[in-house]
Image: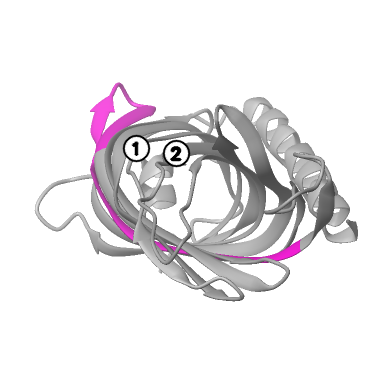
Amino acid sequence: MKIVNNFQLGIAKFLRTLLLGILVSANGAAFADISAIRDVNEKITVLLSSQHLDYKEYQGGEISNSEKGALPGIEISVPLVKNYMFDHEYLKLNLSGYKGQTDYVGQYMVGGSGYGSVRTKDNARITNYGLKYQKGFEIGSQTLVSPYFEVSSRNWLRGLNTYDETYQHSYYGLGLVGQVALTNYLVVSMDALYGKTFNSRIEARGAVNFSAPLGNSSYSKLGLGANYLFTKYLFGQIEVSKINFDYGQSIPNNGFYEPDSTTKSTFYKLGIGLRF
């Protein structure tokens, strides 16, 4: 897709800017300190993102259908609380939305030749909203390690040929983010979270009508990122992250049931941050 190619080109240009920033900072003998990390954590972030969805359903241990594709979207993060009771304490509101098409591979409900006999495009819309509370601890003059708690909800509207399916769940988890100020202008980070999903559910409307709770699962996230400080108030940000979770099989309802499934999504993000 053209939008993906443009997005990848933007990432390449931003990486060149980061490398140039490292060289300029090193030659200018810029001494990094924790204030660069503080500036990064206090910003409002707007990111253009590409979510690469890899979804699979299983019946009898075999793949019955799948959805794969890159969905363009936007992510926004707003710090609601900054250093309220403790230093390096933040409560952030995170919002995101994605919309596009995925490649469906599956089979007919009755008859057909099994998985792969049906191939088409499906519409997809994914929204997320959540809160993240973190408290940072300084290690030396250039490193901040921040344990955090996160709770979030996800909604995926899957537009199939003759009916729509909506998958919903929330999750909570404990994470740890480490940030290092390589220079006064460049901060890199690594982020890991492990948690559990809850309130997982599916609703189908159209030629198929049913709703049912789904089995919950573990939830994991791993990410790498970098922020470049153009000024104390304007930032560039790049990030790559990956999430994993499952849905367990539903009980039969109205003659239908939802099988076990796995979801793996990889995100490529590029954008700006503003500090007020």
Q: Which of the numbered marks, if any, corresponds to residue 245? A: 2
**Majority secondary structure of magenta residues:** strand
Please tell me whether mark 1 sits on a helix, a strand or a loop.
Answer: loop
Disc 1 marks which residue? 217
Residue 250 appearing in the image:
yes
**Which residue in the rendered view is the most extreme toward the right?**
2
Q: Is residue 130 left or right of residue 2?
A: left
Total labels: the figure holds: 2
Counting from the top left corner in percent of width and height, residue 92 is at 32, 59
**Badge 2: how crowded within 10 Å, few (<14), some, or many (20+)?**
some
**Which residue in the rendered view is the most extreme toward the left?**
85
Please tell me whether mark 2 sits on a helix, a strand or a loop.
Answer: strand
Alpha-carbon span between mark 1 and mark 2: 6 Å
User: At label 2, which amino acid type do we have?
Assistant: Phe
Tell me the magenta residue range. 122-147
Residues at circles 1 and 2 in contact by the CB criterion of under 8 Å: yes
Q: Quadrant of the C terminus?
A: bottom left
- Looking at marks 1 and 2 on the same chain, the residue that comes earlier in the sequence is marked by 1
- Compared to residue 218, the image places residue 35 above or below, namely below
- Compared to residue 58, the image places residue 229 above or below, namely below
**Badge 1: how crowded within 10 Å, few (<14), some, or many (20+)?**
some
